Structures are given as C-alpha cells and as structure tokens.
Amino acid sequence: MPALFGTVVIAGIVGIVGYASERSGFALNGVLSSILICVGGAFHFYFVQVLFHVGFRSPGMNVTVASIGALAIVPTRYRGSARRDRQEL
C-alpha cells in the first residue's frame, strides 16, 4: 500500500512536466488536466504492474515513465482536431 501513495506523490511531482508542456505549447489541455493525466497514467501503470508483474524494478522509474508516457500519448491523440478548431475561430 505505501507504494500506491508514493505513486501518487511522484506522479504529482512529474505533473510539473505537464505544466511545462502547457507553457511551451506542446499540450493543448489545461494545466490541471495535464497533471491529472500524469496521475492517471501512473495509477494505470501501477495496477498493470501489480496484476501482470510488468515494469522496471524501481517503482519511481515506473511512475516517471508512465506519467510522461501518458502525457505524451493523450495530447497527441487530439492535437490535430484542436488545432483545426482553433484555426476556424
């Protein structure tokens, strides 16, 4: 159970990457959304690791890779449609 709480804390810290991606223009969701994406990706990877024993040896490395991976996957999925919507305005 302590690993789950550590996962949330480290994912929140990695969520700062979400803030940086918002400021740089990489992600087009809000700052809070980017932080929630990081935390959600960390939760998802934590439970995948518990169920299937897949991942790195270090829980911190698992969280960091999962958070950054989720932050990279989610915004790029909707990037094209968001840019088109913005250009129409």
Image: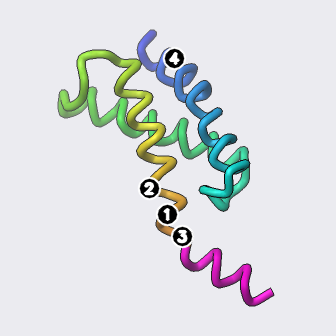
Q: Residues within 10 Å of mark 1 (few under 14, many from 20)?
A: some
**Which element carries disc 4, helix, strand or loop?**
helix
Q: Which residue is mark 1?
A: 76
Q: Amino acid at mark 4?
A: Phe
Start-end of magenta stretch: 80-89
Residue 73 badge: 2
Picture coordinates of residue 57, whole percent (x, y): 24, 17
Of callouts 2 and 4, the N-terminal one = 4
Count of numbered circles in the view? 4
Q: Are marks 2 and 1 in contact (CB under 8 Å)?
A: yes
Picture coordinates of residue 28, whole percent (x, y): 66, 61
Judge depth for marks 1 and 4 and give the one in front.
1
Q: Are marks 1 and 3 in contact (CB under 8 Å)?
A: yes
Residue furthest to the front in view is 24
Picture coordinates of residue 23, whole percent (x, y): 73, 48
Of callouts 2 and 3, the N-terminal one = 2
